[in-house]
């Protein structure tokens, strides 16, 4: 994986009021994945993104804007370009704003296992995403962060698995601070699901338009 640098290296793109221009939706190829990381503030979205991109852990962030990152990696022998949007969340939208949802191919829904509140809101976030996309089964992975803080846990792993089953999505518990491998696996799992979703959608459209042409 190419090293995109940390947020302080100037590789992120702060958004603020300029969010829409750099999130103009362009159709991505099978080798490109646009991922938005959603969830309440304080769940560790920025830590997960930077851990994935640089393998480094930085524990404290003062995030005023969305941050967009880009890198290329090899996944199952194929070159894949990741674009990650680390969303600035307020407690009304969890980062799931209209322009963000339209831009992204898939979504990392993040909660902290130490906070029941951050977990309870995610079913509504998933519904909001599907309503905005106007499709069902949008590629999503549910991620419980801070799994190392067992002594202050408020959400069990079984509860996370049950919610994922209700949402029909993948689920992982990770620790951004302690286990880079699981963090990588979470992003790679979502990437695979996005690529498979695009393949299925492309095959369906080929069948539809092929029939119309015949």
Image (cartoon, rainbow, N blue to C red):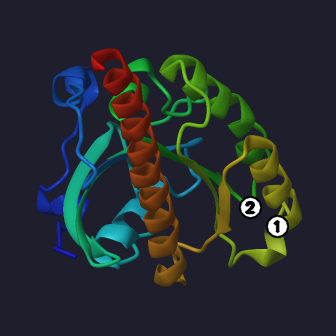
Left or right: 199, with 125 as reference point: left
Q: Nearer the viewer, residue 132 or 100?
A: 132
The vertical placement of 165 against 206, above or below, is below
Q: Which residue is mark 2?
A: 113
Q: Which mark is residue 133?
A: none
SS at mark 1?
Answer: helix
Left or right: 89, with 91 as reference point: left
> In this orientation, does residue 36 appear?
no
Residue 63 horizontal/vertical position (percent): 37, 45
The structure residue drawn at horizontal position 65% and vertical position 52%, both measured from the top left corner, is 111
The vertical placement of 75 against 61, above or below, is below
The vertical placement of 31 against 17, above or below, is below
The structure residue drawn at horizontal position 45% and vertical position 53%, both measured from the top left corner, is 196
Residue 62 horizontal/vertical position (percent): 38, 49
Q: Which residue is mark 1?
A: 157
Mark 1, mark 2: which one is toward the viewer? Answer: 1
Badge 1: few (under 14), some or many (20 or more) residues near its Cα, within 10 Å?
Answer: some
Disc 1, disc 2: CB below 8 Å? yes
- Single out the residue that lies furthest toward the front: 214
Real-space Cα separation, disc 1 to disc 2, in angstroms: 8 Å
> In this orientation, does residue 22 appear?
yes
| The C terminus sits in image quarter | top left
Chain-order first, disc 1 or disc 2? 2
The structure residue drawn at horizontal position 52% and vertical position 66%, both measured from the top left corner, is 186
Badge 2: few (under 14), some or many (20 or more) residues near its Cα, within 10 Å?
Answer: many
């Amino acid at each position: 994986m190419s090293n995109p640098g940390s947020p302080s290296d100037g590789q992120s793109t702060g958004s603020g009021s300029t969010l829409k221009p750099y999130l103009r939706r362009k159709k991505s190829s099978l080798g490109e994945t646009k991922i938005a990381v959603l969830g309440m503030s304080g769940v560790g979205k920025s830590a997960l993104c930077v851990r994935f991109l640089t393998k480094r852990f930085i524990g404290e962030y003062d995030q005023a804007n969305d941050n967009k990152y880009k890198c290329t990696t090899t996944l199952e022998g194929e070159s894949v370009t990741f674009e990650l949007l680390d969303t600035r969340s307020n407690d009304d939208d969890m980062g799931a704003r209209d322009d963000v949802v339209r831009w992204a191919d898939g979504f990392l829904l993040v909660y902290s296992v130490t906070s029941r509140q951050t977990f309870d809101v995610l079913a509504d976030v998933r519904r909001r995403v599907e309503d905005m996309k106007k499709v069902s089964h949008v590629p999503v992975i549910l991620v419980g962060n801070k799994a190392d803080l067992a002594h202050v846990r408020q959400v069990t792993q079984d509860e996370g698995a049950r919610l994922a089953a209700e949402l029909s999505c993948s689920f992982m518990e990770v620790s951004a601070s302690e286990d880079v491998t699981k963090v990588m696996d979470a992003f790679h799992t979502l990437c695979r699901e996005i690529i498979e979703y695009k393949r299925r959608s492309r095959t369906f459209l080929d069948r539809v338009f092929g029939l119309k042409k015949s």
